[in-house]
Image (tube, helix red, strand yellow):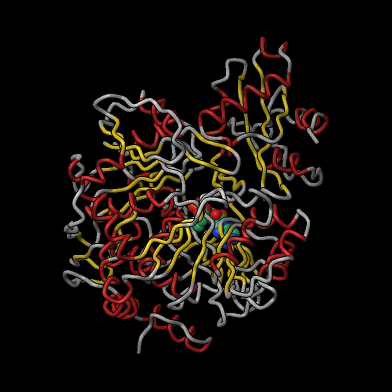
Amino acid sequence: MSYYKIANLEQYFKHYHKSVREPRKFWGKIAEENFTWYQMWEKVVEFNMAEADIKWFTGAKVNIVKNCIDRHLARRGNKTAIIFEPNNPEEEAQHITYTQLHERVCKMANVLREQGVQKGDRVCIYLPMIPELAVAVLACARIGAIHSVVFAGFSASAVATRINDCDCKMVITSDGGFRGNKTIDLKGIIDEALTHCPGVHKVLVAKRTNEQVNMVYGRDMWLQPLLDEASDNNVAEIMDAEDPLFILYTSGSTGKPKGMLHTTAGYMVYTAYTFKNVFNYEENDVYWCTADIGWITGHSYILYGPLLNGATTVIFEGVPSYPDFSRFWEVIEKHQVTQFYTAPTAIRSLAKESIDYVQGFPLKSLKVIGSVGEPINEEAWNWYNDHVGGKRCPVVDTWWQTETGGIMISPVPFVTPTKPTYATLPLPGIQPVLMDEKRNEIEENQVVGSLCIKFPWPSIARTIWGDHQRYKETYFSTFPGKYFTGDGALRDEVGYYRITGRVDDVIIVSGHNLGTAPIEDAINEHQAVAESAIVGFPHDIKGNALYGYIILKEHGETRNQENLRGEINKLISDQIGPIAKLDKIQFVSGLPKTRSGKIMRRILRKIAEGDYSNFGDTTTLLNPEIVEEIKAGKIE
Ligand code: PRX
């Protein structure tokens, strides 16, 4: 019996129980039957949760790119691996076959090696959503270099922090990128970032916009001439199961971004398995995930998961609103997309436009539609189900994280009955638990608690680059012996999970994780600012938006407040990126603090939400009078 595909609900429960009772047999069998290995493992899993030490398939030798591309060549050489849909619909889409992808990745891998990149080196990739991004990622993995993709919307200072944190020696970027009717000067951003990155000696530049850029002699090289010269014959590096595959940064509630490190074999097995089941993937499907490869969703479910299954995956360069709000639906029709995977924020922004944008499109090719990144509210779920899925496509609300590497809780389409706003049941291998305030496991249903996972799964991040202690403290110490997700969840009467949101100081804005501390640090650099506190408040489209309470220094109080607001947002935009800008800024004379000096964010959150009832216990406040002042000055 194979465990790779879940055919019905009875089988789901059977596989699930097997995965809990005999995880080694369950994952061992999946790994053995569905991938090619240079050498098999000695142990399926070894772990010590207290030390946050987890290893899968130890002793095995493998190359993930051989599994993504080479092994498909005999049977699927002429099949399209990647459909590239450009920003401008007038520009022709590209269809890249598995054979062509193989050739391009091999050439790129040879270029990287010729430029001195070796196994274990870190390479920063800062590219728009063009085929070169996929090729660069896969070429790194092929030669065992650790890719660190930085979303091409991050500012120079944010890129520099990420480059320096993991000591990248090379950057791969482009002259620029197109997004809707904007052109973004990516090379200019990299030039600025690199003034702070002494470790980077080489920059490879792909051409996309053909804008004039500055090329630094001895450091910068155009990519295409190097590729033209390169051989397409490349021997992939033989990797250990636990060799690092990539680093991807995610915001923490405090301090600098966390470089989550994912390793090779477990990540490969789990992303392939979850892609197959969560999207009900079949051989001739055309799968489209609208995320950016700069986020984990793009890593696992635009590139690795689909390619491991020999699928056709769409890379979309543009935005849902360009040239108009029917772009998504046009692309689905154009390429006859069968699985569509997007974020609640995109659904909400399209749902608020005229229904005509979607109604003209039959969307009959669709089979499964998915959602990821933040809780999906019932209205958005229903709109998606009715107007995109035509009430016939299961909606898979997939809960997972950068840290988890792959989808954890989700319906299996045509198997698990869906329920609006519920991610439903854990996938096989995933053992969620809810914890109460006393840190005990809650056994019963119809309760809320902190969501933890009590047994390791193959694609869990292994550490935070350069800071294992932080990894241990963040994820394994709040509830000893368990992985703590940072999310709260509700479990209903049948055991379905609904994710209620973050329980820490991370705020999810338009599906992007933002830590409050880094934003506050950016604001506090403004010379007129004394102190600040950021909270989230509900927003119709973004899910959450940011509300800033700011105390000015004395000389700042005489300044024009509108100008100050602009300067503060500019500072945030420069230091982190435009996604972290504040929607509302209120200048205050103080912040509610406990006697130990801790800001009571709970109160600030309530005021930002406009909920003045029940502030809870304010007796421990040092300055209770400030609450009235803040309420009176609330920005509507
Ligand atoms: O709070 C959860 C929310 O997004 C967080 C993870 O963000 P990130 O690491 O950027 O990864 C996003 C893509 C996997 C989670 O801790 N989240 C993600 N998916 C859902 C969700 N919240 C509710 N429902 C979801 N389906």
Measured as percent of width and height from the top left, residue 20 is found at: 40, 78
Residue 257 seen by the camera: yes
Q: Residue at x 63, y 21 (%)?
A: 567
**Could you tell me which quadrant the N terminus lies in?**
bottom left
Q: Quadrant of residue 425?
A: bottom right
Res. 51 visible in picture: no
Q: Residue at x 76, y 39 (%)?
A: 607
Instruction: Locate residue 628: give its quadrant.
Output: top right
Measured along the vertical axis of the image, is residue 630 above or below residue 115?
A: above
Quarter of the figure with the C terminus: top right
Q: Nearer the viewer, residue 508 or 616?
A: 508
x%, y% of residue 162? 39, 37
Vertical placement of 445 versus 297: above or below? below
Q: Nearer the viewer, residue 465 or 172?
A: 172
Assign ligand 1 to one image quadrant: bottom right
Question: Measured from the top left, where is residue 64 in percent x and y?
Answer: 28, 62
Which residue is more in the foreground, 474 or 220?
Answer: 220
Which residue is located at x 50 percent, y 77 percent? 280
Seen from the viewer's position, the closer of residues 539 and 435 is 539
